[in-house]
């Protein structure tokens, strides 16, 4: 008998502070190799609100895909237990979010929500942080994501010269990545002990500069 069960993972993150700018991540995998990814910045709010929004996005995507059998995994005990009805909701701002999640859940014939440890939710975690231009160092492919100086070398440019072109193309401002750079997916912010490091995509950054007519 063919197994028609889909599996999904969800996660939410805030940038720097909580409340803060939020990102959501989600992954849906179908029995036939189907893959749906969610990676979106959703504005200011709390981490718990981000977790709820990520769950709702995953459930909505499953409904749109016509999924009938689904197991959803998340590392937020609060969200999983509240939606499953095991925990009371003390924060009133979470009540409508929980109601929406329960309503979406009811539209899928067979669905189960399960808690997992953060270490078992890495794909959704990475996507939620990538939505904010942030990624864990361990998930970084150093052959793809580089410092400006490394990307500049093949073009016969210094890091300073390439940086000036990036500023003109509105990809950097005052030495920091702009929202445009994040939206184009050309930069990742990697936390360190002092704040963060910026890494740039070896292919997408030059492509964005060529598109803006600042690189041959």
Image (spheres, rainbow, N blue to C red):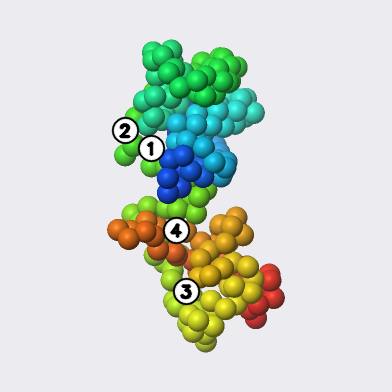
Pointer 3 residue? 148
Q: Which residue corresponds to the image point at 44% horizontal and 76% vertical from the top-left?
A: 150
Spatial separation of the CA atoms under disc 4 and disc 3: 13 Å
Residue at 37% across / 52% down in the picture?
136
Q: How far is the residue under mark 1 from the one under mark 2? A: 7 Å
The quarter in which the C terminus is drawn is bottom right
Give me the C-alpha separation between circle 2 and circle 4.
Answer: 24 Å
| In this rendering, the label closer to the viewer, 2 or 4 | 4
Residue 14 image offset from top left, x and y in percent: 46, 43
- The vertical placement of 14 against 175, above or below, is above
| Pointer 2 residue | 117
Of labels 1 and 3, the one closer to you? 3
Q: Residues within 10 Å of mark 1 (few under 14, many from 20)?
A: many
Q: How many marks?
A: 4
Q: Are marks 1 and 3 in contact (CB under 8 Å)?
A: no
Which quadrant of the figure has residue 86?
Answer: top left
Judge depth for marks 1 and 4 and give the one in front.
4
- Of pointers 4 and 3, the one earlier in the residue sequence: 3
Q: Is residue 201 above or below residue 82?
A: below
Q: Earlier in the sequence, mark 3 or mark 2?
A: 2
Q: Earlier in the sequence, mark 1 or mark 4?
A: 1
In the displayed orientation, state which residue is furthest to the bottom.
156
Q: Are marks 1 and 4 in contact (CB under 8 Å)?
A: no
Q: Which residue is mark 1?
A: 121
């Amino acid at each position: 008998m063919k197994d028609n069960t889909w599996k999904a993972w969800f996660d939410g993150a805030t940038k720097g502070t909580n409340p803060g700018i939020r990102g959501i991540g989600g992954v849906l995998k179908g029995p036939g190799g189907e893959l749906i990814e969610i990676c979106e910045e959703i504005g200011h709010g709390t981490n718990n609100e981000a977790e709820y929004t990520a769950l709702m996005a995953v459930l909505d995507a499953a409904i749109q895909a016509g999924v009938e059998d689904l197991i959803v995994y998340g590392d937020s005990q609060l969200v999983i237990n509240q939606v499953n009805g095991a925990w009371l909701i003390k924060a009133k701002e979470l009540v409508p979010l929980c109601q929406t999640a329960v309503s979406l859940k009811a539209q899928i014939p067979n669905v189960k929500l399960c808690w997992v440890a953060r270490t078992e939710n890495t794909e959704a975690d990475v996507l939620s942080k990538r939505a904010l231009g942030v990624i864990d160092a361990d998930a970084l492919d150093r052959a793809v994501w580089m410092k400006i100086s490394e990307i500049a070398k093949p073009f016969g440019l210094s890091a300073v010269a390439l940086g000036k072109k990036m500023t003109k193309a509105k990809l950097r401002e005052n030495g920091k990545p702009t929202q445009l750079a994040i939206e184009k997916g050309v930069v990742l912010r990697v936390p360190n002990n002092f704040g963060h490091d910026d890494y740039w995509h070896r292919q997408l950054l030059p492509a964005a500069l060529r598109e803006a007519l600042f690189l041959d």
